[in-house]
Amino acid sequence: MIRDVGEQEFQAAVVDRSHQVPVVVDFWAEWCGPCRQLSPALEAEAGKRGDDVDLVKIDVDANQALAQSFGVQGIPAVKAFSGGEVVNEFTGAIPPAQVAAFFDALVPSEADRLAESADEGDLRRALELDPRNVKAATGLGRILVARGENAAAAELLEPFEGDFVAAGLAARSALALEDPPDAKLAAAAVLKQPVEIFDELLALASRQSESAGEQAEELDRFQDSLGVSLRDDIAAALGGEVAMALDGPILPEPAWKVILEVYDPDKLVWAMPRMLDAANDKRAAEGMARREWLEEAVGGRTYYGIAGDSPFAMTFDQGYLLVGPNRGVIDRAIRFRQSGYTLASSSRFSKLLPVGGNVNFSALFYQDALELLKPLADKIAAGGLTAAQMEALEELRGQTEPTLAYAYGEEDRIVFAAGGVADLLSTGLPALLGLGGNLGFGHGVGLPVSLPADEPEDHGTVAGGTGGEARNSLRPAA
């Protein structure tokens, strides 16, 4: 309800009435330009809420004592009453969005109430009443994405890119319309801390070399030429998690990426240009062109890279360094991660995991690359193959199943297991490569692996039996 009120009606129309519904009071004047500018927004928001809120307009010229009693010094002055008291207020002509928020704090609109529902019909009705209602849009977007209607979800959520939740859903629906989140090649491992590896390598070299002192001096000279400590500025800045993947076509440019855990991004950003400067000095001495260190801030994120014959881009995200051939590959990887649309959600990947077993792997290797190899196989075929290789090539073209190999680090051994490896090695790939016959993978495989018994790896334990995968245990060599 919207009405004009004077001093005599104020007690009943505002103070008393505010015990029943919130009352918004607009102190204004006919000659006030900002008042006329604000008035349509006030009336629109009050109108959306019907009988759930009253809007009272008070002309300060005709009701000066009333205005003074509420400390009105400038107009428009808007005060919200509830329970007989002023509970919120503002002065000046604020934007319509802020006016809407002001009313929302008092009483939600019908659209806002409908937006709280999980019913698709209510959410669609909310958007009919208020097309900019982001809560209704995200609620409906979730329903559409869950139902697989990704094109409709992307179109619905596009106008709300400024909202974090809506933008995440929009990205997920848009990505679902692209290639599925099935990396073609992926490898990942949890390693000992790089700084510990660095120290152990130096100690090993010292024990096994008669010229350890000279090697140490040579390392010092090398680090001095870089202006960087490989241990303190590089190794110490990195964590033990590492991954790499190939997500798209091999030709014309592989869509590869490398991900490294990072403890100190600032130290890496400081060290890498200095290492490039040292490399450029060497290139210049050999008559080669210098390469340029690139740094660019885009959309709140800083990208780094090196220009040249083999350019690459990199950035930091949530404690990791992402490196790829270009910014597009990196951005796509970040969007996938933010939307939860990752390899772990791929059915082709998850079906290879141990059934009811431990998935706390120390390392893994996954391939779904045979489809990627087909264009290369066509080129190979054009170059001439033996009859056996042509037969193997045709078998390779028909192979579509992925494979997964993984390892657990235990106290006294490394346990290897795999899913689908026999299928991979029984294809025509070995024959095509001239390896002759099929390769087998089973309990009898032995590899020369040695772990110091007094320095066990601690990357998880094997929990029970696993479902149908090949397994091999490699104990420390005596």
Image (cartoon, grey):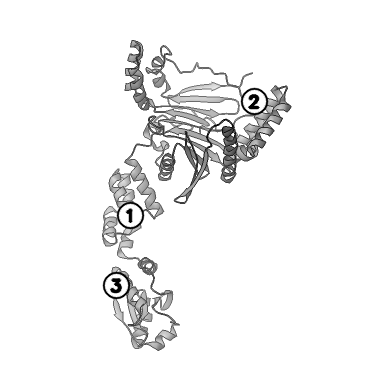
Characterize the local packing of mark 3: few (<14), some (14-19) or many (20 or more) Cα atoms within 10 angstroms.
few
Q: CA distance from mark 3 to mark 2?
A: 78 Å
Specify the amino acid type for callout 3. Answer: Asp
Residue 220 at x, y percent in the picture:
69, 33
Q: CA distance from mark 1 to mark 2?
A: 60 Å
Up the image or down, 471 lies above or below 264; here it is above
Q: State the residue at coordinates (43%, 77%).
A: 86
Characterize the local packing of mark 2: few (<14), some (14-19) or many (20 or more) Cα atoms within 10 angstroms.
some
What residue would you read off at disc 3? 51
Residue 448 at x, y percent in the picture:
57, 18
Specify the amino acid type for callout 2. Answer: Ala
Specify the amino acid type for callout 1. Answer: Pro
Which is more toward the observer, 85 or 95? 95
Up the image or down, 428 lies above or below 177; here it is above
What residue would you read off at disc 2? 453
The first of marks 3 and 2 along the sequence is 3
Q: Which mark is residue 238?
A: none
Which is more toward the observer, 278 or 69? 278
* Contact between labelled residues 2 and 1, with CB atoms less than 8 Å apart: no
Up the image or down, 84 lies above or below 418; here it is below
Quadrant assignment, res 65:
bottom left
Name the image quarter holding the N terminus. bottom left
The answer to whether residue 193 shows anywhere in this view is no
The first of marks 3 and 1 along the sequence is 3
The answer to whether residue 455 shows anywhere in this view is yes
Q: Which mark is residue 159?
A: 1
Of discs 3 and 1, which sits in the foreground? 1
Quadrant assignment, res 332:
top left
Secondary structure category for the residue under label 1 = helix
In the displayed structure, does residue 121 sit left or right of residue 7? left
Secondary structure category for the residue under label 2 = loop
